[in-house]
Amino acid sequence: MKKLLTLIFLLTTLIGLSACQKPETYTFSFFDYMDTYISINVMADSENQANEFKSEIESIYQMYHVLSTGYENLPANSGYLQNIYTINQQNNIKLEIDEPLYDLIFEAERLRELTDGYFDISMGEVVSIWKTVILDEESGYLFQEIPTNVFESIMTQINAIVLEQDVIELTEESGKFYIQVKSTHAKLDLGAIAKGYATQRVYEYLREQNVEYFSISAGSSSIALGQNPNREGGVYNVSLANPVRTTATDRTYGMIYVKDISVTTSGNYEQYALYNSLRYHHIISPMTKTPAHYYHTLTILGDDAGVLDAISTALFSMSPEIMNAWLLEHQTEYQFEIIRYNYDGTITTNLTSTVFEENEEN
Amino acid sequence: MDAKKSVQNKRDWILATLLFVLLGGLFIAFRLFAFADEASLAHVYYGNSDEPIVTIDFINYRVISNYDQNVPSEYDDIYPVINEGQQTITLLGDYEINGERQIVVIRYDYGRKSVEIIQEQSPNNICSREGESTGWPLICLPNRIRVEFETNDEDFTV
């Protein structure tokens, strides 16, 4: 009898334990937002909870996609007041906008001041010309040499554009939010901040849900990380893309080991055209209205993916001397860590706690 | 004599059962743990070649077509056919129905870092019945197409 009772107890315990639901990692991906492949890994207690996460995360990316695009009008019945496309059609008119877009542009303007104007969302006209030269399916020169006459024509167009200062006026009145672009020709472009900004909102959402184990990969240039359930210490191994790869075996040049952090890389290697052997890419310096040639990639680590997106863009156009002076002033406050793959092939690091290992063959 | 035979039979059954359980356990453990690390690349091969015809890069979210499949001139299409929207790769297998070689359709998933054979013709459909793989190789015979995974020590590239 005693044996029978023990057996029943053991069986009941076993069945009870097997009924407990163990947290699992769920993966979901989005292809339709911000021209990028977004992949999320998140640990959830149940499939229902994972689906809730997915739904909320998708709605965040969807909203910022619709609000920040400069290429598409607002969809019918979107419920939004304006997006960047419609704002760009209505310069010098005071427009009411939704609070999330106001906050995003407000943050972009704060970062313009922080970077002494090296990050500027109001130079869309110039960015658009360079993107066409590089990426246009019919007239672009992706990975090819730009003919001299074409290059000279581009520079004539670029030089004719006068970039005005402080063209964006943001106001808040009685709980309503307004923007006025005070220029006849300036165009806004949120391409260098919207993806990171939306990723940071997703990061904050997961933190609010007390999710500890997750990763958010927004394209190949921006990731926001919690902890890794598959490695000791929760660490993620993040390799750094080699911007001058020549074979299938030198895809990366080094590795960093990180958790609970965001990492963003700006680089000249995914989309560029050549002129006089220099890469002309999509990161345009507001100071020269042309792409800078100081670095091939610049990787920045910090706690806010939106800030990193904008700051990496700004730093990419700074000379090493200007960047070092800027870092001296701001690195401690923002706890940025930086790895530069310089144009001459050397690597410079400004790291405080992150471990960086350069590949042996480099 | 009969009693002795009966005991021997019983022992044989116990031994067979033990062996069955042991081998079954080993197989399950192999499937669960042998490919536990996430793959960073999956290579698709055709025939005896050691050069992958297509490489799926799970880290950088791209599919690289390394070279065209060598197929007889009576087949109009150029293989591999890569459909990034559907996330599929189509190759021409060796298995013939009414003298015509049949296609093999491979579906990949960047987020799950997985590959699955979703369409193929063969006598037993073994490779499509394998389901979604995140590490163990998928071998399609007699189509002579195989998928092998490569695991690097990295989770992301930026």
Image: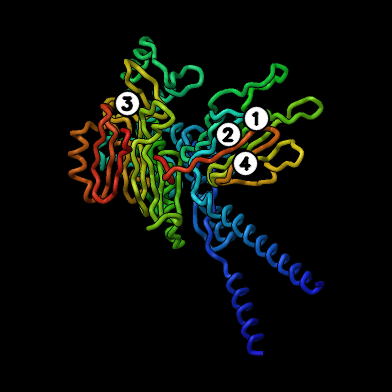
Q: Horizontal placement of B70 versus A338: left or right?
A: right
Residue at coordinates 43% horizontally, 51% vertically from top-left?
Answer: A201
- Residue B138: numbered disc: 4
Q: Nearer the viewer, mark 2 or mark 3?
A: 2
**Residue A233: quadrant of the picture:** bottom left
State how far apart marks 1 and 4 are (Cα).
Answer: 14 Å
Element type at mark 1 = strand
Q: Chain of mark 1?
A: B
Q: Nearer the viewer, mark 1 or mark 4?
A: 4
- Residue B91: numbered disc: 1
In the displayed structure, would residue A169 be above or below residue A346? below
Element type at mark 2 = strand
State how far apart marks 2 and 4 are (Cα).
Answer: 9 Å
Dot 3 corresponds to which residue? A291
Element type at mark 4 = strand
Dot 2 corresponds to which residue? B44
Kind of residue sitting beneath label 1: Leu
Q: Are marks 2 and 4 in contact (CB under 8 Å)?
A: no
